Image (cartoon, grey):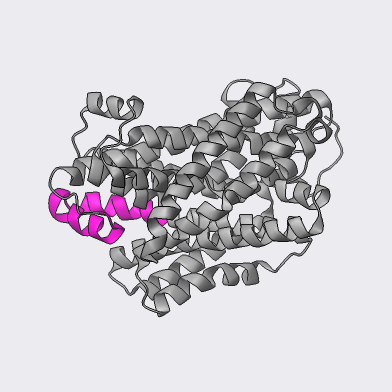
Amino acid sequence: MNDTPVSERERSLSARTTSQVHEALAGRRRGARLLLPFAGPAVVVSVAYMDPGNLATNLQAGAGYGYALLWVVLFANGAAMLFQAVSARLGVATGLSLAKLCARRLSPPVVLAMWVVSEIAAMATDLAEFLGGAIGFSLLARIPLIVGMAITAVLTWALLSLQRRGFRPIELAIGALVGLIAVAYVAQLVFVSTPWRPVLRGMFVPLLPDREALVVCAGIVGATIMPHALFLHSGLTGERIVPRTEDERAKLVRYANAEVIIALTVAGLVNMGMVVMACGAFHGGHREVTEISAAYRTLTPLFGSMAAGLFLTSLMASGISSSVVGTMAGQMIMQDFLGVSLPLWLRRLVTMVPSFVVVALGCGVTRALVLSQVVLSFAVPVPMLALIGFASSRAVMGDHRLGPAMVLLTLVVFVVVVAMNIVLLAQTWPSF
């Protein structure tokens, strides 16, 4: 370390984190001090796996089928973990986001088509996330939904403004919200009895109780593998820390993998907690409870205002944080695909418009949430295929490309995810 005076900017949280990462890569940090500076990108994208869309599908699974579909949650989380790890590897190995790689290596018509699909997916994602947070405020404060949307918009904007201070403040803010979501769901489990043997059987014994359960399974998978999260993760890891040597790059890949495993394990446990809570609260005598507002109103007489308040707290935290992450992803997608950067306020306004239109027209919120998942089912193959193609290329990845076994595994998971999304699309499309 030299003794050169540093500026105020260099003493910022982000600059200190960068310095700590390089210390860890050089072997000068141990224990928790070794891992903490690397925590950030996967924590941010893990919010996409605990958003209101996940809550809606997990609520259906637990209330309607008890613990029988926990194995689907486990599979979906494992698939998400696999592709987020590939996305993080791509960013570290190339220093570029997936969108920027597409822009540089694919033909202009293909790039334009991918951008259009990705933008539609980002807006559909934000529809579910933004409405979820607004529903939470509306139910908690007993205010009109449109007012809850305004509150959600202000809080989302406040969090997004942290980006001006570098990468670390917003990582810490979203990490705090992730912690709040996790604690809220753990606390909710106190109010319901949890027979662990059926829970474990549901996790590891695949069952499909009826035909409708297949649709719920597809909904769980569709709400878990998020296109915007795959784009965003590569950009966050690619821009966060610039490795100075190939040895540092290899270490960054390993630490990125470790962070993905830890962050998405927490997200997976939260999702399983959602199903367990829904089963314990509703499966015995309230199987018809499949909507968020109905769940809140049913929880209050069953377990009291504290249980219902925790439910809304987790909903609001997930809605706000996932809406922030969705906007960040939308910014990156436009900038890296097209080289166009919109002001933050304009980007946020554009992504909020569909939500306000849905409410202003009096459309059912649950119907809008389902429709957003159908839109995502169209979009998810785009980043998945691009990731597999680039991550398996020596010309792109060098020594960090995926091996044959990993390529085969990603292709198998891709086929399964796309097949389940087709099922979701086929079953829900006639209702629209």
Picture quarter with the N terminus? top right
The quadrant holding residue 411 is: top right
Residue 58 in view of the camera: yes
In this rendering, the answer to whether 120 lies above or below 262 is below
Q: Which residues are magenta?
A: 290-316
In this rendering, the answer to whether 259 lies above or below 228 is above
Q: Residue at x 14, y 50 (%)?
A: 302
Q: Residue at x 28, y 58 (%)?
A: 291
Q: Position of residue 273 (x, y in %)?
A: 33, 38
Residue 369 in view of the camera: no
As rendered, which of 75 and 264 lies closer to the eye?
Answer: 75
Q: Is residue 35 left or right of residue 402?
A: left
**Total numbered circles:** 0
The quadrant holding residue 194 is: top left
Picture quarter with the C terminus? bottom left
- Asked if the magenta segment contains residue 315, the reply would be yes
Q: Is residue 198 left or right of residue 123?
A: left
Q: Residue at x 29, y 50 (%)?
A: 310
Q: Position of residue 395 (x, y in %)?
A: 84, 34
Main SS, magenta residues:
helix
As rendered, which of 364 and 343 lies closer to the eye?
Answer: 364
Q: Position of residue 173 (x, y in %)?
A: 54, 49
